[in-house]
Amino acid sequence: NTKKFKKNAVKYLENYNFAFVSRYLSILEALAAKRLAFALYDNPIKEDYLRMSPFSGYIVIENSPKKLAERVDYYLRNRQAEEELIEKGFSWVTNQTWENVVGAYLRLWR
């Protein structure tokens, strides 16, 4: 059943090409699993949260199911574009270490 909460969702990512997620950690997990992440928003706060995130350039962000379906169709027909976005996202997420996070916070604090 797709409506049930999955305790270890990461293991399910390997079975699919795409991840339809919109929470921060789930997006990071999708990028780390080399899956193209699609995020849907329905309010301005969620839009800002997604578009202002450091990974916004590596995921697909839309505000309507129709637009989301069009983007899915695009990536199904354009595998090279899909692979390029996946590789960029994977490269970015693999550099997100605790040391880098601490460094970013220290730079902000100064």
Image: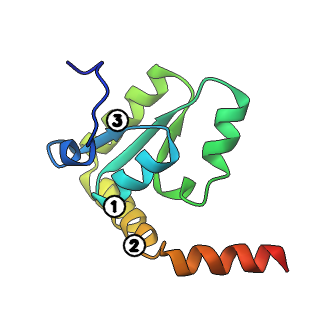
- Using the numbered discs, state the Cα–Cα distance from disc 2 to disc 1 in whole angstroms: 7 Å
Question: Which residue is outermost to the left?
Answer: 15
Instruction: Please report contact status of discs 3 and 2: CB closer than 8 Å, yes or no.
Output: no
Label 2 neighbour load within 10 Å: few <14, some 14-19, many 20+: few
Tag 1 secondary structure: helix
Numbered tag placed on residue 15 in the rendering: none
- Disc 2: which residue: 94
Label 3 neighbour load within 10 Å: few <14, some 14-19, many 20+: some
Give the residue type at disc 3: Val
Query: Between residues 4 and 83, which one lies in front from this camera angle?
Result: 4
Q: Residue at left 41%, top 36%?
A: 71
Q: Quadrant of the C terminus?
A: bottom right
Residue 58 position (above or below residue 110): above
- Disc 1: which residue: 32
**Place of residue 57 in the rendered image (x, y in percent of width and height, measured from the top left):** 54, 57
Tag 3 secondary structure: helix
- Disc 3: which residue: 72
Q: Residue at left 53%, top 58%?
A: 55
**Place of residue 16 in the rendered image (x, y in percent of width and height, measured from the top left):** 19, 42
Give the residue type at disc 2: Thr
- Using the numbered discs, state the Cα–Cα distance from disc 1 to disc 3 in whole angstroms: 20 Å
**Place of residue 95 in the rendered image (x, y in percent of width and height, measured from the top left):** 45, 76
Tag 2 secondary structure: helix
